[in-house]
C-alpha cells in the first residue's frame, strides 16, 4: 500500500510454442524482376520484460494502473531468418490502464501505451516509436470466470531511421480483434489467473497479417 493506492514490481517471461512465418518479396529493376519467397517455424524464449514500478488506485468500480515496461533482447534472433523470437533491441513502453468493473459484472478495460525503441545492433536499424491502444470488453459470469472480446490499435508515430533503413521511413500500423477468456485458479492460498485469447489481424500496413493465440499465467505475491 502507498499513495492511497498500491505499489509493486513485475516481470514476464514469454515463451512461443510455435511461430510460423511465410512471405514473399519482389524486387523490380529496369532489366529484371526478382521474387523471393520463404517460410519457417520456431519456438522458444522470446523477449523477457520487466515492470520496475506498478502504481495502482481503486475508486469503487473504477481502477487505474500506471506501469512502465522494459523489453529486453533475450529471444532468438538471426537477421537472415524469418522466424525470429525476439527483436534484438531494448524497448521502453510507458502504459496507463483503466478498468471499469460494474456491479452488474460488466468489464470495460483500456490500456494506452507509447513504445520507444533502441537501435538493432545487428542491422543498424532503428524502428520508430509506436502508439498502441489495447481494449477488452467482458462479462464476469462468476468472481473467477469471465468471457468477452479484446483487440488492439497500433500506429507508428516516428519514422524508421539508421544506416540499415534502406527502404526509408517504412511506418507501420495495424488493428486486430478476437475472443478472450479468463479464469482464476486457487493455488496455495493465492489466485493464479489464466488468460487465453485469440487475436485476428483485420489490417496491417508494413507488417505481417497474423492470427495469434495467447495463454498468460499471472500470480500476485
Image (cartoon, rainbow, N blue to C red):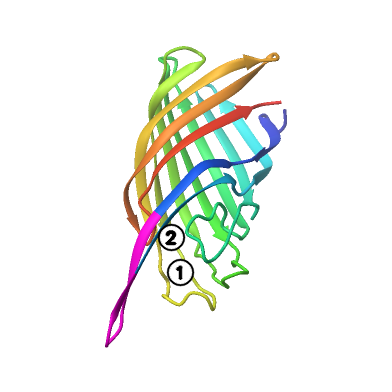
Residue 108 in picture, x, y percent from top left? 42, 29
Q: Is residue 95 left or right of 134 when viewed as pictured?
A: right
Residue pointed to by mark 2? 156
Residue 193 in picture, x, y percent from top left? 57, 24
Within 10 Å of the Cα at label 1, are there few (<14), some (14-19), or many (20+) other Cα atoms?
some
Query: Contact, CB < 8 Å: mark 1 with mark 2?
Result: yes
Name the residue: 51% across, 15% down.
144
Which picture quadrant has residue 217?
A: top right
Q: Give SS at disc 1.
A: loop
Residue 200 in picture, x, y percent from top left? 35, 41
Residue pointed to by mark 1? 159
Hey, which residue is sitting farthest bottom in the picture? 31
Could you tell me which quadrant the N terminus lies in?
top right
Q: Give SS at disc 2.
A: strand
Name the residue: 59% across, 47% down.
46
Q: Which residues are magenta?
A: 22-35
Magenta-span inclusion, residue 116? no
Q: Is residue 213 left or right of 48 when viewed as pictured?
A: left
Within 10 Å of the Cα at label 2, are there few (<14), some (14-19), or many (20+) other Cα atoms?
some
Q: Is residue 26 left or right of 84 when viewed as pictured?
A: left
Magenta-span inclusion, residue 33? yes
Residue 105 in picture, x, y percent from top left? 42, 17
Q: Is residue 2 above or below residue 166?
A: above
Q: CA distance from mark 1 to mark 2?
A: 7 Å
Amino acid at each position: 500500500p502507498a499513495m492511497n493506492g498500491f505499489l509493486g514490481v513485475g516481470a514476464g517471461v514469454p515463451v512461443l510454442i510455435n511461430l510460423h512465418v511465410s512471405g514473399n518479396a519482389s524486387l523490380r529493376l529496369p532489366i529484371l524482376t526478382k521474387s523471393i519467397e520463404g517460410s519457417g517455424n520456431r519456438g522458444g524464449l522470446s523477449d523477457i520484460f520487466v515492470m520496475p514500478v506498478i502504481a495502482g488506485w481503486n475508486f469503487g468500480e473504477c481502477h487505474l494502473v500506471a506501469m512502465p515496461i522494459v523489453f529486453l533482447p533475450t529471444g532468438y534472433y538471426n537477421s537472415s531468418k524469418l522466424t525470429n523470437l525476439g527483436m534484438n533491441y531494448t524497448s521502453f513502453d510507458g502504459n496507463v490502464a483503466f478498468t471499469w468493473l460494474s456491479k452488474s459484472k460488466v468489464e470495460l478495460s483500456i490500456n494506452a501505451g507509447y513504445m520507444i525503441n533502441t537501435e538493432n545492433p545487428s542491422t543498424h536499424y532503428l524502428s520508430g516509436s509506436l502508439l498502441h491502444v489495447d481494449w477488452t470488453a467482458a462479462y464476469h459470469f462468476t468472481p473467477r470466470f469471465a468471457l468477452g472480446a479484446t483487440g488492439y490499435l497500433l500506429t507508428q508515430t516516428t519514422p524508421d531511421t539508421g544506416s540499415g533503413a534502406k527502404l526509408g521511413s517504412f511506418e507501420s500500423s495495424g488493428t486486430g480483434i478476437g475472443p478472450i477468456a479468463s479464469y482464476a485458479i486457487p493455488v496455495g492460498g493465492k489466485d493464479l489467473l489464466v488468460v487465453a485469447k485469440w487475436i485476428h489481424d483485420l489490417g496491417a500496413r508494413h507488417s505481417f497479417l497474423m492470427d495469434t493465440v495467447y495463454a498468460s499465467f499471472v500470480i500476485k505475491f
